[in-house]
Image: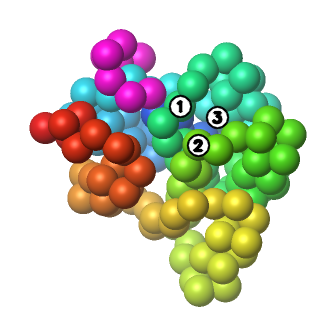
């Protein structure tokens, strides 16, 4: 869904309410995006599309987000920036995320400020954010 000339973003999130919030935030930036409710669906999407950033919830119904990231990095050799998303944050969790292959970490709920921070960090062209 979204605008074909803009960067494509993937959210891997099973919680409906978080999907709705993310959708509203991303639509404000006019990016193309997909939402995968499971790690299996995320793997399918990443095989068929190129994403500029992938947001991954740590608590997925089929496997943990850190396991998905390992699969994306090791099996698919994905270099795309991967952002850990969780409602439960601690220094230990952050360390585990970075050790497993995540590039960045944000806490729920999604909002424009947090997403803008991620986009500024990982999207090369700041003109996309105008």
Kindly indicate the quadrant of the structure image that contains residue 21: top left
Please name the residue that numbered disc 2 is placed on.
80
Which residue is found at the position 58% from the left and 51% from the top?
Answer: 82
Could one spot residue 111 in this view of the protein? no
**Judging from the image, what secondary structure is the residue with disc 3 in?**
loop
| Vertical order, 48 against 125 (above or below) | above
Q: Position of residue 11 (x, y in %)?
A: 53, 39
Q: Are marks 2 and 1 in contact (CB under 8 Å)?
A: yes
Mark 3 Cα within 10 Å, few/some/many (few <14, many 20+)?
Answer: some
Neighbor class of circle 1 (other Cα within 10 Å; few <14, some 14-19, many 20+) is some
Q: Nearer the viewer, mark 2 or mark 3?
A: 2
Q: Determine the residue positioned at 75% across, 31% down.
A: 43
- Per the image, the residue denoted by label 3 is 37
The part of the chain drawn in magenta is: 1-8
* Percent position of residue 53, x then y: 49, 42
Where is residue 91? Give x, y as percent.
59, 86
Q: Residue furthest bottom?
A: 91
Predominant secondary structure, magenta span: loop
Looking at the image, tell me whether mark 2 or mark 1 is earlier in sequence order.
Answer: 1
Residue 60 within the magenta-colored segment of the rendering: no
Image coordinates of residue 42 in percent, x first then y, are 69, 32
Is residue 2 located in the magenta-colored stretch of the structure?
yes
Q: Is the C terminus in the top left, top right, bottom left or bottom right quadrant?
A: top left
């Amino acid at each position: 869904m979204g605008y074909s000339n803009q960067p494509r973003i993937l959210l891997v999130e099973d919680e409906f309410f978080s999907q709705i919030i993310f959708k509203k935030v991303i639509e404000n930036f006019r990016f193309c995006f997909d939402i995968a409710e499971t790690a299996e669906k995320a793997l399918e999407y990443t095989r068929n599309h190129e994403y500029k950033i992938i947001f991954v919830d740590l608590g997925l119904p089929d496997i943990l987000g850190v396991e998905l990231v390992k699969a994306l990095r090791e099996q698919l050799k994905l270099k795309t920036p991967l952002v850990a998303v969780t409602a439960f944050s601690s220094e230990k969790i952050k360390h585990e995320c970075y050790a497993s292959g995540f590039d960045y970490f944000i806490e729920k709920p999604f909002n424009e400020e947090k997403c803008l921070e991620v986009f500024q960090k990982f999207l090369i062209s700041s003109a996309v954010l105008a």
